[in-house]
């Protein structure tokens, strides 16, 4: 029987300098460390498949390095397919979308992202609706409408190209807990969907079960990860560079290692009959390969026994 769920993993590997290291043994002896295990796409994609993932979600900031090695999206997707991996989607940020004068520029960038993702064969353009709150918030009603207008226009273009645009809010975004749901209501459900990041919604101060039940018909895909921070204070969410401050705090944990009601949420996903890509994110993990394996185990051996 075919699976309903296809498991993907977000590419947070940062710079991968090589396409394939053929002289692996000689390369190891250059510094006799484990660095050679994380420097070519051949092994990175092997890790994805070996730890139970069938897809990879790309980050736009990685594309210059990827295309520098593979020249074209088609060459990369063929290489990935040879490892049993396909591109599930790509992250995208609608920076400056709250500024009316930037509308044309934002929409053009969104359409370009759709074209890029289509060239990679991906399905989901998971889109942060705007800049960080710091320096841009609080939004007025006009700013929120400007964001919705940009998303609607990009979403319509995406839908016409076989791509699902999914709003992906971050807990430190200019659209925050006081207007996050309002933004969703301002967008067109026919072409603007939702990528539910299970941790980000909770960090923002929302209830993930209630949010899912309210918007389950809009959800086209997931970023699945855990957190131990059930709501973050305004002064933290609105601060500068909160997610990347290097103070040792982990906002995100592997599924099952935080406090989210993941089993209950997954039961509701099953009851609703969701089918499609679910992307695990392990950003912030100190041991990335171990996190990938632990996350895959939880998804398939714990949640998978409920629904897959």
Image (spheres, rainbow, N blue to C red):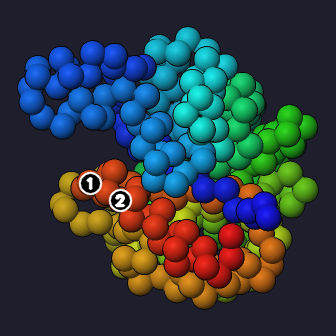
Quarter location, residue 4 = bottom right
Read off the residue under disc 2: 291
Read off the residue under disc 1: 287
> Relative to residue 217, is residue 261 drawn left or right?
left
Report the Cα–Cα distance between label 2 and label 1.
6 Å
Please tell me whether residue 248 is drawn above or below residue 44 in the rendered image. Answer: below
The residue sitting at 90% across, 56% down in the picture is 190
Residue 9 or residue 164, whichever sits in front: 9
Disc 1 secondary structure class:
loop
> Relative to residue 151, is residue 91 drawn left or right?
left
The quadrant of the image that shows the N terminus is: bottom right
> Relative to residue 206, is residue 32 drawn left or right?
left
Please tell me whether residue 46 is drawn above or below residue 36 in the rendered image. Answer: below
Please tell me whether residue 277 is drawn above or below residue 150 in the rendered image. Answer: below
Residue 264 or residue 130, whichever sits in front: 264
Please tell me whether residue 292 is drawn above or below residue 43 in the rendered image. Answer: below
- In the rendered image, residue 154, in percent from the top left (x then y), is placed at 78, 40
The residue sitting at 45% across, 53% down in the picture is 51
Residue 135 or residue 58, whichever sits in front: 58
């Amino acid at each position: 029987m075919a699976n309903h769920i296809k498991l993907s993993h977000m590419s947070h590997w940062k710079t991968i300098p090589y396409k394939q290291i053929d002289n692996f043994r000689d390369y190891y002896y250059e510094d006799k460390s484990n660095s050679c295990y994380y420097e070519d796409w051949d092994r990175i994609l092997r890790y994805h498949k070996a730890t139970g993932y069938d897809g990879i979600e790309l980050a736009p900031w990685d594309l210059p390095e990827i295309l520098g090695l593979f020249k074209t999206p088609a060459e990369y997707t063929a290489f990935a397919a040879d490892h049993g991996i396909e591109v599930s989607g790509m992250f995208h940020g609608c920076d400056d979308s709250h500024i009316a004068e930037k509308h044309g520029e934002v929409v053009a960038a969104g359409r370009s992202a759709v074209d890029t993702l289509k060239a990679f064969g991906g399905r989901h353009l998971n889109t942060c609706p705007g800049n960080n709150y710091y320096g841009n918030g609080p939004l007025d009603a006009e700013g929120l409408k400007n964001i919705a207008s940009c998303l609607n226009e990009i979403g319509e273009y995406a839908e016409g190209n076989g791509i699902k645009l999914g709003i992906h809010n971050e807990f430190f975004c200019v659209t925050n807990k006081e207007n996050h749901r309002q933004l969703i209501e301002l967008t067109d459900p026919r072409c603007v969907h939702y990528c539910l990041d299970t941790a980000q919604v909770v960090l923002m101060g929302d209830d993930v079960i209630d949010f899912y039940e309210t918007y389950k018909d809009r959800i086209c895909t997931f970023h699945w990860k855990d957190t131990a921070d059930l709501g973050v204070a305004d002064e933290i969410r609105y601060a500068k560079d909160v997610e990347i401050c290097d103070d040792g705090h982990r906002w995100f944990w592997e599924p099952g290692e935080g406090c989210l009601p993941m089993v209950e949420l997954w039961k509701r996903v099953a009851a609703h009959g969701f089918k499609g890509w679910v992307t695990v994110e392990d950003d912030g993990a100190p041991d990335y390969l171990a996190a990938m394996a632990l996350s895959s185990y939880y998804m398939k051996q714990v949640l998978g026994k409920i629904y897959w």
